[in-house]
Image (spheres, grey):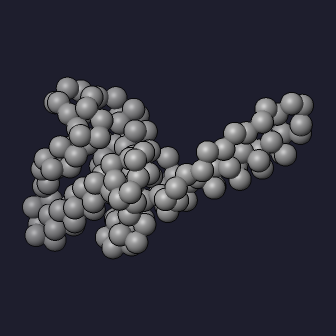
Amino acid sequence: NASLQCLVHTPLLPRYFNVEYRYDLNIESTWGMAGKLAVALSELLADVESAKANGTGVVAPRAFRRTIGDFQPQFAGWRQQDAQEFLSLFLAGLSEDVNRTRRKPYMELKDSGGRPDPEVAREFWSAHCTREQSAIAA
């Protein structure tokens, strides 16, 4: 709950998930939730905005919780959960839902083998950027 409240009140996130995310929605992904997590967050953010506008300020995120439970079953119940674990898994799933890379190529990276760190870092960063083109960096 605390992690989610922090995210909801991060100005860039509601702005992106208002409309823009739809252009990046990756419904073909087999790694994430095929866009369902991103859509659920967008709907939750719209509910929060509506609650602010009508003065109640109260939102019961039931549909969002169901989607989270579908994505990660350990978060399906009402037990206390680790905020960092939730945030890490949620952002990873969200990142995949809006990843612009539709087909991730298999890449085998060689060991550093004594090469200079900057060279190895560039190689790994290049491989990462080939597979991950998301507005959300997990």
Decide if residue 75 is on the left or right side of residue 108: left
The quarter of the picture where residue 50 lies is bottom left
| Numbered marks: total | 0
Residue at (71, 53) in percent of width and height: 126
Res 84 seen here: yes
Q: Nearer the viewer, residue 75 or 101?
A: 101
Decide if residue 126 is on the left or right side of residue 92: right
- Residue 76: x and y in percent read 20, 33
Decide if residue 49 is on the left or right side of residue 62: right
Q: Nearer the viewer, residue 80 or 92?
A: 92
Residue at (11, 66) in percent of width and height: 55
In this view, 109 is above or below 57: above
Q: Nearer the viewer, residue 23 or 86?
A: 23
The quarter of the picture where residue 80 lies is top left
Q: Quadrant of the N terminus?
A: top left
Residue at (89, 39) in percent of width and height: 116
- Residue 115: x and y in percent read 89, 37
Res 11 seen here: no
In this view, 134 is above or below 72: below
In this view, 46 is above or below 96: below
- Residue 6: x and y in percent read 35, 49
The quarter of the picture where residue 40 lies is bottom left
- Residue 78: x and y in percent read 16, 30
